[in-house]
Image: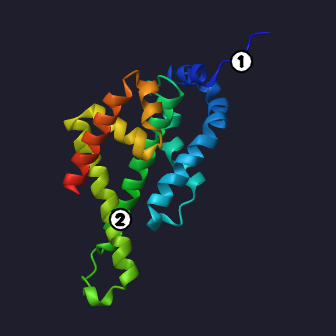
Amino acid sequence: MAASPDLTEKLRRYSAGDREIAEAVLAEVLPRLHQIAVRELRRERYMAPLEPTELINEVWIRNLSKGGWQIEGREHFYAIAARAMRWVLVDLARNRLAQRRGDGLAPASLEDVPIAAQSCSNDLESTVRIGDLMEKLEKYDHEAACIVDMHYFAGFTLEEIAKITGLTVRHIRHRWEKGRDWLKLRL
């Protein structure tokens, strides 16, 4: 009897087009995806109606179930999933902002808008702004953007990222600080 493949091998088979292994992959990665989703939704508190399971489903349906990813291992998969969650949240924020901007209705005075709604709108705008800035950072410094995604969005430690990428912790820390500082400067 052959031993069952580990998660890294299952992910590689899945990314190579083996759809039969999708259920096994999903069952195995679900707990960590749930942790990442909870972390993301806690950061994006205006998305209160969205549950972690709904975010995971959206990511799985929109992105991961279609395949075509070049997954190098479990950590790489989680980094991709965290980035996909960020994209989903940015898209949701853009849609909610578009709806709030009127859909053709006459603009209201700011005095008519409750403080909580103004705060929510600011959160939505921040999410969209961070999403746009991350896209620009990817073009400016792809490596720094990947490290920011893995550390800030997926929750990996700098040591884990060094292990995943094969780079030194010092190099990872430098790229993290560079990416973080680049984003802070533009926020």
Residue labelled with disc 1: 4
Q: Nearer the viewer, residue 82 or 147?
A: 147
Quarter the C terminus occupies: bottom left
Numbered badge on residue 65: none
Q: Image height check: is 136 above or below 23?
A: below
Left or right of 104? Residue 31 is right
**Residue placed at 45% from the left, 59% from the top?**
43
Task: For residue 104, say whether it is visible.
Answer: yes
Upstream in sequence: badge 1 or badge 2: 1
* Residue at far front of view: 170
Looking at the rendered structure, the secondary structure element under dot 2 is helix
**Residue type, mark 1 in image:** Ser
* Residue at far bottom of view: 111
Distance between the alpha carbons at the discs numbered 1 and 2: 44 Å
Q: Nearer the viewer, residue 52 or 156?
A: 156
Task: For residue 83, say whether it is visible.
Answer: no
The percent position of residue 72, horizontal first and vertical second, equals: 47, 22
Label 1 neighbourhood size at 10 Å, few (<14), some (14-19), many (20+)? few
The percent position of residue 23, horizontal first and vertical second, equals: 66, 33
Q: Image height check: is 179 above or below 41?
A: above
Left or right of 124? Residue 183 is left
**Residue placed at 28% from the left, 35% from the top?**
174
The percent position of residue 14, horizontal first and vertical second, equals: 55, 24
Q: Image height check: is 51 above or below 139?
A: below
Q: Image height check: is 7 above or below 130?
A: above
Residue labelled with disc 2: 124
